[in-house]
Amino acid sequence: MDTYLHRNCPLCGGTSATTEVSSARCGESLEFAEIQKFWSGLFKEKVFFSYARCQACKLLYCPEYFQSDQIAQLYADMAPNMDLVPSAALVATQQGYWQAVADLVPSGGDYLEIGPDVGYVAQQAAASGKFGHFWLFEPNVAVHPTLARATGDCSNTILAEMEDFSTVPDGSVGLAVMIHVLDHLLDPLTTLSAIRSKLRPDGALLIVTHNEQSLLRKLMATRWPPFCLQHPEVYNPRSITALLEKSGYGSVNVARSTNHFPLDFMIRQAAHAFGLKLDKVPLPKRALGLKLGNIQTIARF
Ligand SMILES: [Zn+2]
């Protein structure tokens, strides 16, 4: 048996793809026991499975990737995120996601999120008073108590599950959210179709992903951080629109999203690049908002 999965294009099923980006030693050339060391990103050498562009639909994806049981093992061995005190910059970034959809979601529906982490967006949604029940699918059980508190007075169901949404009633959800989740999925079509069946006809789905057509990707080339072992495919505005339309969504809107970075961190990084050390110099703590390589996509039923 082959070590890794050989995949057709996860968007259109195409079998012909042209390799576009590879690491110096590519993932598919390494044994599983060896590649495991690179999963957490602690090793300096960058290793990922080669990305190829589907000749039919232009999606950029890995034709060879981990098998499902390998993925389960890798995520299980990963140390859970215990960083329960978020930075002001992270909070500002997540508030921006909620503000992008706050005005267009209907009142009275339920809320569904896949991979909500500690519930940055869920907390904003709960505070808006627009939603009934919260359905939260979060594999990291360590954050479940924090997540439960984020929903405030609203009722919630929190499951350590990423694929089976059968407990959610069909046609009940006003807003579904996936932030940096879609590009981790082996079979995004199945997940997106399942979520659509849970939406109300006036409901919406908000997705945040990286954009492989961004300026940042062009500048950084193979060093672009989203080229990594965790992403079996990466999207651009055109390919994510095609994916959502194929999953049955009626209207799809893609915009660049804003990431907030701590200003002191940015200045220290820039100084470091010029060989200056500012470790002892006090710097402003404010956050700086930049549209840098990410896109937010809003799909309607
Ligand atoms: Zn394709």
Image (cartoon, helix red, strand yellow):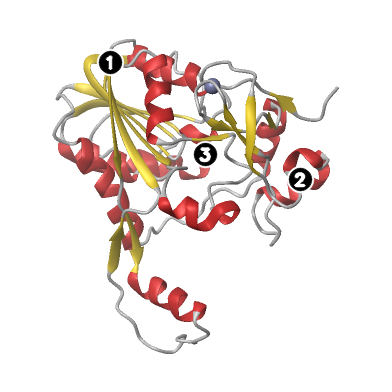
> In this view of the protein, which residue sits in the foreground, 169 or 274?
274
Q: Amino acid at mark 2?
A: Ile
Q: Which residue is mark 3?
A: 141
| Residue 2 percent location from the top left of the image | 83, 25
Q: Which residue is mark 2?
A: 35
Q: Which residue is mark 1?
A: 250
- Rendered view: 146 above or below 164: below
Identify the residue shown where x is 43% and y is 55%: 84
Which circle's residue, 1 or 3, is located before the other in the chain? Answer: 3
Q: Amino acid at mark 1?
A: Gly
Report how far apart the C-alphas of labels 2 and 3 lie in the structure: 26 Å
> In this view of the protein, which residue sits in the foreground, 268 or 99?
268
* Quadrant where the N terminus is found in the figure: top right
Helix, strand or loop at mark 1: loop
Q: Is residue 92 left or right of residue 29?
A: left
Helix, strand or loop at mark 2: helix
Marks 1,2: beta carbons within 8 A: no
Q: Amino acid at mark 3?
A: Val
**Circle on res. 185:** none
Dot 3 crowding, Cα within 10 Å, few <14, some 14–19, many 20+: some
Helix, strand or loop at mark 3: helix
